[in-house]
Image (cartoon, helix red, strand yellow):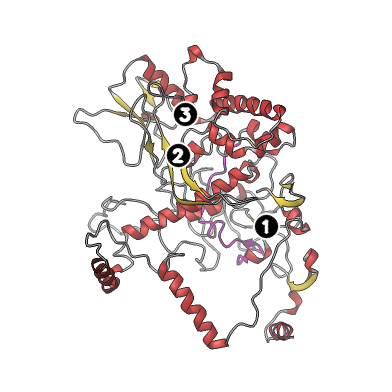
Amino acid sequence: RINAARCNEAMWRPGFDHSRLELLDVGDLGRTSVPSPGGGSSGSATGGSGDGALACYYCGALLWPGEAKPVPKTGGCKRGRACCAEGQVHVPEVQLQPAIERLWRDDTPRAKTLRKYSRQFNNALALASEMYDEVDLDGWAPSIVIEGKLYQQIGPLRPGEQQAEGFAQLYVHDPAAEDDEAVCRARHMPMYMKKGASNAEKTRVLELLGELQGVLKESNSYVKDFVHANEIYSQGEVTDAHFVIEATGKPDADKRTYKGEQAFTEVSVLAVEPRGGKVPKRSIMVRHRGGGLHFIDESHRAYDPLHFVLLFPCGDDGWHDGISLNPKGSRAPALRAAPDRSPAAAGTSTAAPGSTRAFVAEEADGDDDDGDADAESDTSSDEGESAAAAPSAGAPRRKKPRQLSTRQFYAHRLHQRAPDPKAPEALFRATRLFQEYVCMSYAKVETQRLRWVSNNQATIRADLYKNLRDAVTAHDHTTGDAVQAGKRVILPATFSGGPRNMHQRYQDAMAVVRKHGRPSFFLTMTCNPGWREIQDALPPRTITRVRGRRVVEC
């Protein structure tokens, strides 16, 4: 009765538009009357999935009705809350590799084997190793849970004495003694397969390893560069150049050549200076032998493609420093050709397709809501590095463009766009490999936020916590830990999960209780993955049976 009274009070409040009410079928929950999305317009100017689904006006991301917000002066078009920050985020689409994409989409035994052992296949074919602590849950564990910090490492192109080949080294083995079956067996040995796997399944795994390895040799730009670098090293000692993968962008044309020949796509050739020139920060050295394993910085553009080779078989860049946001209101290049129903639409502008640095000369006609942008800059530049040259005296001061944050990049990439037969869908069909990618993305976002807080203590006015810091230090002395090691970093209340954030949430909850009294109910909501609404929103072949229950694979 109380809930019914509250509902009636909201519906009959002055100004409530009853003409926007329509019946909404929610399957097993029954039917209810809710405001129709977009004031009676259930479509989008950009189309959608073809079945009336909402799509973001700026980037084409598929939206649920609850997350769609209206775009002014567009004839009822909608935008998402977190997909593209009102057109400011334009991330190039993942390049399509037809052979691997076909395996992700098909329903053949080979394709099912790939999806079943997606993580094992990716780890066997990866160019760099990933280190993390995975939590082993008792019993059935449908999700991947990791803890601690993630690390990626890469070694030299050739193994040391009495060392087995692994990762990138398996792609650059001696061509004179090439034996693809032996290489496949070497990749298959560390693969963990479930108990009771049939001989037919093991045979399919070996065949798939050979096929995927051949495809990556032909399509992956990093594999090609590593093979070519190994050939150069094998011809003799290289003393006049360094082969590196720079952190923030592909090399220019003059940096791709070695001794006058076009050599590389992703690897830069840096000449060795007489006085010993330094390799740029966060770059990856491509070494022939020795030197052990080197860590890859999480802000490096190759962090994603070096490990997730089956998700990015052509070597698409991940997030890195230096990607600028577009002006608010810009539309993705693929959507600019779509008909614009806006009565105020006038003129178009162009930019280089697929360029994350391109600026689009479009005026934003949206509202001033900037809730999608990060409150904190997620740049990982070290302290002391110059971000931009100082303007000359008397020259007008130009506003520095804001950088694309880690969260904005991965939020854009993890949004599913309108179905396109030619668009790659490996990311959303990779089952547990997709879960690993999502965990890695979240860990990278948290790492960049913590790095920003550590490098910007003055910006958040951490000196206001001086008395608290002194009290903690005094407590350390009284407990016997007189040596203060490391650097103390103050986490502000805006950092989700931090002690001040949790204390603030607790105080807010207690304030609600003081104002409105103790809660009467504690409600929980369960979800059945077999509901028609969920099945209709999923692509084909993403539902499987586990222990007699229908569950979502990815």
Task: Label 3, secondary structure: give it.
Answer: helix
Image-based side of 362 in relation to 108, left or right: left
Disc 1: which residue: 45
Disc 3: which residue: 168
Q: Nearer the viewer, residue 296 or 384?
A: 296
Q: Earlier in the sequence, mark 3 or mark 2?
A: 3
Query: How far, Cα to Cα, is label 3 from label 2?
Result: 14 Å
Q: Which mark is residue 263?
A: none
Alpha-carbon neighbours of circle 3 within 10 Å: few (<14), some, or many (≥20)? many
Q: Earlier in the sequence, mark 1 or mark 2?
A: 1
Task: Label 2, secondary structure: give it.
Answer: loop
Look at the magenta stretch and give its main secondary structure: loop
Mark 3–mark 1 CB contact (< 8 Å): no
Q: Can I make out residue 402 in this image?
A: no
Query: How far, Cα to Cα, is label 1 from label 2?
Result: 35 Å
Task: Label 1, secondary structure: give it.
Answer: loop
Alpha-carbon neighbours of circle 1 within 10 Å: few (<14), some, or many (≥20)? many
Q: Hey, which quadrant is residue 24 in on the image? A: bottom right
- Which residue is drawn at the image coordinates 27% and 58% (left, top)? 487
Residue type for callout 2 = Ala
**Quadrant into which the N terminus falls:** bottom right
Q: Hey, which quadrant is residue 82 in on the image? A: bottom right
Residue type for callout 1 = Ala
Q: Residue furthest front?
A: 480
Image-based side of 185 in relation to 361, left or right: right
| Coordinates of residue 90 in the picture (x, y in percent) | 52, 50
Q: Earlier in the sequence, mark 3 or mark 1?
A: 1
| Coordinates of residue 362 in the picture (x, y in percent) | 51, 56
Q: Nearer the viewer, mark 1 or mark 2?
A: 2
Magenta segment boundaries in residue numbering: 68-96
Image-based side of 258 in relation to 365, left or right: left
Q: Is residue 77 magenta?
A: yes
